[in-house]
Image (cartoon, rainbow, N blue to C red):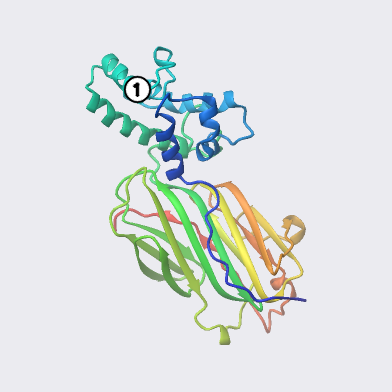
Amino acid sequence: MKQAPHRAPVAPRSPGHDPEDVRRELLYLRKGAGYADKRLSGCVALVGVLGGETEPTEVLRERLESAIDSLHDADGELLRIVFGLDDDVRGVATLSARRDHAGARLGLGREAVADRDARAVERLLHQLVTGWYPKSPVAIRIPESHNGIVNHVVHIGTVVDNMRHELTHHQYRFMVTFDGAEFVAVAATHGGAVAVTRGEWALRTLTTPGGVVHQFWHVSPLRRGVTYELGFIVRNPDMASDPYWLSEESLAFHEPTRHVVFEVQFKGTVPEQIWTFSGLTAAERPGRPSQGVPLTPESGTVRAQFRDLYGGLYAGVAWDGQLRASPATMPTYEAGLCGITPVGRA
């Protein structure tokens, strides 16, 4: 076994762009002369939810128009005018002039147009993030009636010290698709010392026959279309007398999840075989090294990325601790979690 140098614990990072970035870019795109292909190309987050920079500009524009047209109560017509996509306002140089045109067509005053315009942008953001419009590039679509969330970014960073679990950082950034939930729940197969590190959440932990359920209560009821961040750390409360080797870090993705990163830092002993897996049931995970994608540590750390996970199946990183340990003397365990899930009012 190789020996890895000691370094700072893995800290949670947030790759990609969240709905707040998309919101800012939508607001930017409606200003001035409104939509233009060149202006859209500079909106990195919006381009991302429309399919990515590898897509032709015509396709990105078509998807944006499809999302706008999917809105109800004439919001689509309003936003086509506001963004400068309507034939009648092409070339109109200011947002205020396009709002005046919208007011004249829809029979609204300027203030009413501005207020309705702002609400319509929020509805458009929800359509783009959930992918619920006809020409969406997103493989996972969540209907309006689904009482759930959309995880935009999940980051799991774990530190393993000589094959024993030391700590794991969890970070979730998600948008809520309904109003009124007061807490979210994360189920785990094992206990530990848990502390909130990000967001306005109060922790309650319930013990179950199969492990524990961590309830994270928000300071106020969760609201549809709002982006929240939840971060917490789980520490091994007694590494000195812990008899178990850690062999896996994984998560079951019950809610649609756009971007996932697992990072594992090995201090001391570095396993000879490390691999990623996804789409496995609890009984199947973590599979065998030959069935997964091998990972090569850099300075004792491995990193795996996934996109568009859903369906309650597991994904994560595993290593050969369970293959090398003697079950009679050194049993292994996994640090798998069930996915973050909105629960509603207690």
287 versus 137 height, above or below: below
Which one is nearer the viewer's eye here, 206 or 51? 51
What percent of the width, then of the height, locates residue 296? Answer: 74, 62
What percent of the width, then of the height, locates residue 170? Answer: 50, 63
Residue that protrudes farthest toward the bottom in the picture = 241
Is the residue marked by circle 1 packed among few (<14), some (14-19), or many (20+) residues within 10 Å?
Answer: many
Kind of residue at disc 1: Leu
Q: Quadrant of the N terminus?
A: bottom right
Q: Name the residue: 68% across, 58% down.
A: 276
Q: Is residue 89 visible?
A: yes
Q: Is residue 135 visible?
A: no
Q: Name the residue: 44% across, 50% down.
A: 174
Question: Which quadrant of the figure has residue 318?
Answer: bottom right
Name the element at disc 1: helix
What percent of the width, then of the height, locates residue 100? Answer: 29, 19
What percent of the width, then of the height, locates residue 113? Answer: 27, 25
Q: Quadrant of the C terminus?
A: bottom left
Relative side of 209 to 3, left or right? left
Relative side of 261 to 186, left or right? right
Question: Which quadrant of the figure has residue 230?
Answer: bottom left
325 versus 257 height, above or below: below
226 versus 318 height, above or below: above
Q: Name the residue: 36% across, 55% down.
A: 343
260 versus 121 height, above or below: below
Residue marked by disc 1: 78
